[in-house]
Image (spheres, rainbow, N blue to C red):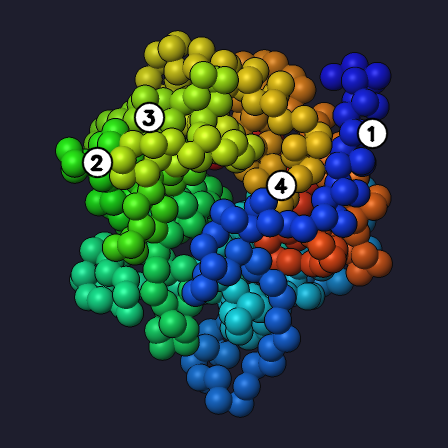
């Protein structure tokens, strides 16, 4: 990006993020239903009680937050490390493997803390300091796994496949609804963790998530535009989403690469084709979801476009079919025109973190550029203007720290510090 264009991007980003910090966050909060799974993964005070099971304390006690102090490195890696350390100081519950929430965080923010941990470990300068954190995340992740429901009711929700609950599973938490997009994020990170550690359990869990996603495919001919993956496994759910189906396609492609199982690639192609058929708008961008009558909700989010850019790019690499890359290029161009700094600044940082990861991966494959400089400007504005003295990043109205926000900014700094070949 030329210097004058970068300056324009920075100026526009500064204005929009300042407004975002002062304005209500209703636009992104609407992405999650109210009630049992609130949109804001807000921090809550929590002290490990004496009644906490000794087994839980013992199994994670050897994984304290990363050591404090100024890192002996600079630039993006240093900022990724400082942000990660702040995430651990402020949100991690020492001795539990979990993060603070109500009393524990929901799976959505936990999945991004996992992503931040894995991505930071892809930075060679950070791996020695943060390698032990991978085991701690796996310990915490295990508390969300519901492996024995066998279709049994959980309140008003029914699950047919073992997967990760939206909240910590019983006995430590209420368990309940399983969100397909949250499981997608976890599955993708498990595969990246497997590549780092060669722990077979990570690959096995990713395959279990894929089974959950594939079982969620909505093929009923009574639906408008049959197919797609729903937002959750709640019987009341009636929408099928880009952000559940496109990342499932990405997960399928990556599992095919690791296992050679052609069924995963076949499902990935089917999922990607369904999104293009049912949710592609005349603008060249993808709507949010389609309801049971086949009516599209046209709301545009950066991460939905990013997931389709990434899915197309990965499918091109897996199949050699140039049509996939052409489609990814078309989406990247349309997204670049639409998602101005103002629009990106109006979304919770988790959305741009997904967008930038996919777009920078696409840039690397196509040997194009632009996404990296935008991502750099985005996080550097947070560093300069939306960071507290304790290195917490803030967002919303009033500006406040959240695990979801912190993990997103750490991820982007870590992505900027590592090779795009590690992004998936």
Q: Residue at 43% across / 65% down in the picture?
A: 36
Task: Determine which residue is flagged by label 4.
Answer: 347
| Residue 365 can be seen in this image | no
C-alpha separation, residue under disc 1 versus residue under disc 3: 37 Å
Q: Position of residue 91 (x, y in %)?
A: 63, 65
Residue nearest the observer in this picture, 326 or 40: 40
Task: Determine which residue is flagged by label 2.
Answer: 223
Q: Nearer the viewer, mark 2 or mark 1?
A: 2
Q: Is residue 319 left or right of residue 123?
A: left
**Numbered tag placed on residue 421 in the rendering:** none
Q: Residue at 84% across / 16% down in the picture?
A: 4
Tell me the crowding category of disc 3: few under 14, some 14 to 19, or many 20 or more residues within 10 angstroms, Cα based.
many
The single residue placed furthest to the left in the displayed view is 221
Q: In this view, does 252 lie to the left or right of 60?
A: left
Task: Determine which residue is flagged by label 3.
Answer: 278
Quarter of the image that includes the N terminus: top right
């Amino acid at each position: 990006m030329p210097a004058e264009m970068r300056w324009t991007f920075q100026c526009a980003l500064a204005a929009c993020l300042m407004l975002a910090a002062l304005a209500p966050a209703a636009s992104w909060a609407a992405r999650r239903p109210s009630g049992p799974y609130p949109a804001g993964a807000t921090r809550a005070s929590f002290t490990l009680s004496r009644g906490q099971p000794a087994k839980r304390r013992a199994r994670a006690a050897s994984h304290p937050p990363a050591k404090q102090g100024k890192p002996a490195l600079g630039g993006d890696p240093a900022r990724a490390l400082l942000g990660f350390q702040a995430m651990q100081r402020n949100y991690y519950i020492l001795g539990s493997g979990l993060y603070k929430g109500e009393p524990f965080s929901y799976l959505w923010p936990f999945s991004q803390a996992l992503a931040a941990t894995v991505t930071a470990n892809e930075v060679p300068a950070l791996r020695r300091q943060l390698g032990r954190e991978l085991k701690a995340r796996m310990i915490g992740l295990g508390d969300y796994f519901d492996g024995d429901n066998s279709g049994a009711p959980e309140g008003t929700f029914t699950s047919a496949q073992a997967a990760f609950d939206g909240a910590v599973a019983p006995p430590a938490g209420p368990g309940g609804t399983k969100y397909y997009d949250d499981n997608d994020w976890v599955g993708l990170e498990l595969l990246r963790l497997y590549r780092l550690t060669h722990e077979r359990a990570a690959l096995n869990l990713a395959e279990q998530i894929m089974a959950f996603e594939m079982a969620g495919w909505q093929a009923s001919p009574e639906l408008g535009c049959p197919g797609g993956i729903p937002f959750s496994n709640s019987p009341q759910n009636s929408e099928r989403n880009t952000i559940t189906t496109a990342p499932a396609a990405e997960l399928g492609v990556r599992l095919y690469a690791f296992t050679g199982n052609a069924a995963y690639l076949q499902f990935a192609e089917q999922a990607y084709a369904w999104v293009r058929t049912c949710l592609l708008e005349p603008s060249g961008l993808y709507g949010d979801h389609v309801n049971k009558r086949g009516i599209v909700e046209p709301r545009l989010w950066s991460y939905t476009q990013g997931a389709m850019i990434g899915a197309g790019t990965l499918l091109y690499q897996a199949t050699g079919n140039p049509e996939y890359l052409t489609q990814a290029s078309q989406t990247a161009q349309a997204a670049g025109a639409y998602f101005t700094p103002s629009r990106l600044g109006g979304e919770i940082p988790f959305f741009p973190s997904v967008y930038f990861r996919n777009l920078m991966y696409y840039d690397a494959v196509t040997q194009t550029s632009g996404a990296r400089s935008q991502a750099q400007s985005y996080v550097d504005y947070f560093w300069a203007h939306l960071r507290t003295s304790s290195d917490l990043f803030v967002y919303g109205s009033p500006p406040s720290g959240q695990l979801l926000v912190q993990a997103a900014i750490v991820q982007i700094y870590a992505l900027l510090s590592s090779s795009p070949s590690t992004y998936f």
